[in-house]
Amino acid sequence: MTTIYPVARSHQPSSHLYDVPSLENGGANFQTWKYRFLMILEMRELMGYVDGTAVAPRPSLPLQQSKYLQNDKEARAQITLTLKDEPLNGVLHTKTAKEAWDKLNTRYKVSLYDAHIQNGHVSYEYIKKALDSDHKYLGLQTDPSKMDEPLCEACAKGKISCTPIRKEHISNRAVNFGDILHMDLWGPSPVRAPGGFQYTFTILNEATGWLHEPKMRTKDEAFG
C-alpha cells in the first residue's frame, strides 16, 4: 500500500509574476485590473500586505521580520510590474505594498455615475446596495464626494417606448383616389444606385392602395 504524504508548504515567497493586463494610463480598466489583482493576492496569501492586516514583526525577531519584508516586496512587485507609466509614476516613491495600493485606490476612485456606466448601466440603488453588503464589488472604489445620481441619457433613450398602433381606424378611410396621400422621403443612401440615385420618394394612396416610389438624385426633386 502506497502512503501519500502532504507536500510541505514553502515559506519562501514566489518569484512568479502573474500575467495580468496592465493598468492603463488614465485608469480606465482599474476596476477589472483590481479584481484580477485581488484574486492573485488571495492565492498568494499576500492580501494582508495591502489591507493592513499583516503586521510587521518586532526588530527582535529578525527571521520573522525578514520574511515579512520579503513578502511585502513580492506584493509591491506584483503591483508595480503591472502598471503602465502614468499610474507607475504615482507610486514610484512608495516604501510598502500597502502604501502603493492605497495611492492607486485614492487616485482611481470613480463617481457613482461612472460606476453605473462601467457596470452595464445597472441602477444606482443596486450599486449602493452592493457596496454596502458583505459581498462587495471587488475592485470597485467610489468617491464619497461624488455620489450624486444624474440622469443617464443612454438609459433614458433605452427605456423609451412607442404608443401602440391601434388596429382599428379612428377616422373614416378615404373613399376617393387622391383624398389622402401618405408620403415619405428616404435618403441619402450610403451607396449611390446606378444613375446617381440616392433618395426614394414613397407615395401611397389611402383609398386604393396605389403605391408609387420614384428614385431621385437630390432631395429637392420631391418638390419638382
Image (spheres, grey):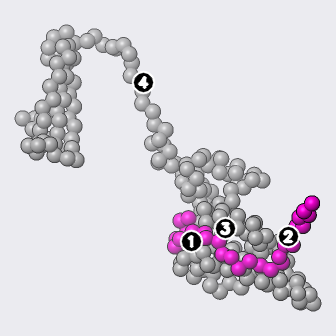
| Chain-order first, disc 4 or disc 1 | 1
Q: Nearer the viewer, mark 2 or mark 1?
A: 2
The magenta segment is: 1-29
| Chain-order first, disc 4 or disc 3 | 3
| Chain-order first, disc 3 or disc 2 | 2
Q: What type is the residue that disc 4 sits on?
A: Pro
The image quarter in which residue 195 lies = top left
Q: Mark 4 and 1 residues: CB-CB less than 8 Å, in contact?
A: no
Query: What percent of the width, then of the height, locates residue 113?
Result: 56, 55
Q: Secondary structure at mark 4?
A: loop
Reading the image, the residue beneath label 3 is 37
Query: Residue at coordinates 42% horizontally, 30% vertically from top-left?
Result: 162
Measured along the vertical axis of the image, is residue 177 above or below residue 148?
Answer: above
- Separation of residues labelled 2 and 1 (CA atoms): 34 Å
Instruction: Tell me if 5 is positioned left or right of 178 in this view.
Output: right
Reading the image, the residue beneath label 2 is 7
Looking at the rendered structure, which numbered label has been put on residue 164? 4
- Can you name the residue that lies furthest to the left here? 224
Query: What percent of the width, then of the height, locates residue 75?
Result: 72, 77
Q: Nearer the viewer, residue 14 or 166?
A: 14
Q: Mark 3 and 2 residues: CB-CB less than 8 Å, in contact?
A: no
Query: Residue at coordinates 93% horizontally, 90% vertically from top-left?
Result: 60
Q: Using the rendered image of the protein, determine whether residue 77 is visible from the camera's viewpoint.
A: yes
Residue 23 painted magenta: yes
Query: What percent of the width, then of the height, locates residue 192?
Result: 16, 46
